[in-house]
Image: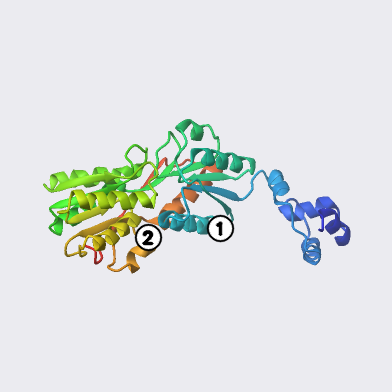
């Protein structure tokens, strides 16, 4: 494998000159620059990125920790963040925490050792102190932690929009499937907005929470079966994720209920599957691309020591399809 010394020798320049070309530092004539690049191509020389990052004092790598890239919302969010990061000249180091605090802590430590330039945290199993002492450019998704800037959708309004739609469609008893309210997540405001509007609208509702592992699909099956067994007269369902809402559709078929004739269903996120599932799923659309763009921008602003907004709450949109 070729080294920087090999490049310098064949190009007839010093190692310092090659280093300056690689790091774009100091004056180098265009002729010399082209010669160095030509030799690098001929020798298939690959610079040591870790060494270069130590010299530049930045790595051009951003870290992202999410619960699971297999979950449709987080998969789409990770894809959007990677795209925005790449546009700004950064690569993305992606980690799945699986909601395991020990695993998340290991990933945070790994990112620090590898000198990522900033971290976006979409998995929040650690205690507040574990984040606030990192002394790194940080952005959280859907959680308020001290002075760390966060990005979220307007969760409370999203829940309210869902309730209003079901009430407007004539639902008189609504089942609500939420995340676990013990988790300190801004997404719990979806339940706050929904329950407020349901009370004001004078409709009966029942709320079922997931376990602490809010992405356990087996738990979805259990609570949905329990909901329809205990409340067979439910005629509307608001689930705080599209994935849960799609599970509700499956169980409606099991219980012989037709959507939307017998049960009207609305989810939250507007993942890709919401539009191609039959019947199409009504949902509250999160602006995933805007959330990704803003999260990356907040990291870049911190790196440049610019003043930053601590709270970014982006508007949501009601998308009505066949399920309501």
Indicate the position of residue 278 as horizontal and vertical percent values: 29, 69
Query: Is residue 3 or residue 126 the one in the foreground?
Result: 126
Visible residue check, residue 315: no
Q: Residue at x 33, y 67 (%)?
A: 277
Q: Which x, y percent locates residue 276?
A: 34, 69
Give the foreground label among 1 and 2: 2
Residue identifier under label 2 = 271
Residue 83 appears in view: yes
Counting residues from the start of the chain, the first of labels 1 and 2 encountered is 1
Quadrant where the C terminus is found in the figure? bottom left
Label 2 SS: loop
Q: Which mark is residue 179?
A: none
The residue tagged 1 is 86
267 on left or right of 104: left
Q: Residues within 10 Å of mark 2 (few under 14, many from 20)?
A: many
Q: Is residue 247 above or below residue 38?
A: above
Q: Residue at x 85, y 61 (%)?
A: 11
| Left or right, 29 with reference to 215 | right
Residue 124 horizontal side relative to residue 13, left or right: left
Q: Quadrant of the N terminus?
A: bottom right
* Residue in the picture at 29% in, 56% down: 267
Query: Where does the image place residue 322, in percent across and percent down from the top left?
Result: 24, 67
Q: CA distance from mark 1 to mark 2?
A: 22 Å
């Amino acid at each position: 494998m070729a080294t920087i010394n090999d490049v310098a020798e064949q190009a007839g320049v010093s190692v310092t000159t090659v280093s300056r070309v690689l790091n774009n530092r100091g004056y180098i004539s265009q002729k010399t620059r082209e010669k160095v690049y030509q030799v690098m191509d001929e020798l298939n020389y690959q610079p040591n990125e870790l060494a270069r990052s130590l010299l530049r004092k930045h790595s051009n790598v951003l870290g992202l920790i999410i619960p699971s890239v297999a979950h449709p919302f987080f998969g789409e969010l990770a894809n959007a963040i990677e795209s925005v990061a790449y546009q700004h000249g950064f690569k993305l180091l992606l980690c799945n925490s699986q909601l395991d605090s020990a695993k998340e802590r290991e990933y945070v430590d790994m990112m620090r050792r590898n000198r990522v330039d900033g971290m976006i945290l979409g998995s929040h199993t650690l205690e507040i102190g574990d984040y606030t002492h990192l002394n790194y450019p940080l952005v959280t998704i859907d959680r308020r932690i001290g002075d760390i800037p966060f990005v979220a959708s307007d969760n409370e309004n999203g829940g309210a929009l869902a309730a209003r739609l079901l009430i407007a469609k004539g639902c008189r008893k609504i089942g609500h499937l939420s995340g676990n309210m013990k988790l300190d997540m801004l997404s719990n405001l979806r339940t706050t907005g929904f329950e407020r509007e349901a009370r004001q609208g004078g409709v009966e509702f029942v709320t079922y929470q997931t376990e602490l592992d809010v992405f356990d699909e087996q738990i979805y099956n259990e609570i949905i079966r329990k909901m329809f067994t205990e409340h067979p007269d439910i005629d509307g369902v608001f689930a705080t994720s599209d994935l849960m809402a799609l599970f509700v559709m499956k169980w409606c078929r099991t219980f012989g209920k037709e959507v939307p004739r017998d049960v009207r269903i609305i989810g939250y996120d507007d993942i890709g599957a919401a539009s191609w599932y039959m019947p199409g799923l009504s949902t509250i659309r999160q602006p995933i691309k805007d959330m990704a763009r803003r999260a990356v921008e907040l990291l870049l602003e911190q790196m440049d020591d610019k003043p930053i907004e601590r709270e970014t709450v982006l508007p949501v949109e009601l998308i009505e399809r066949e399920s309501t």
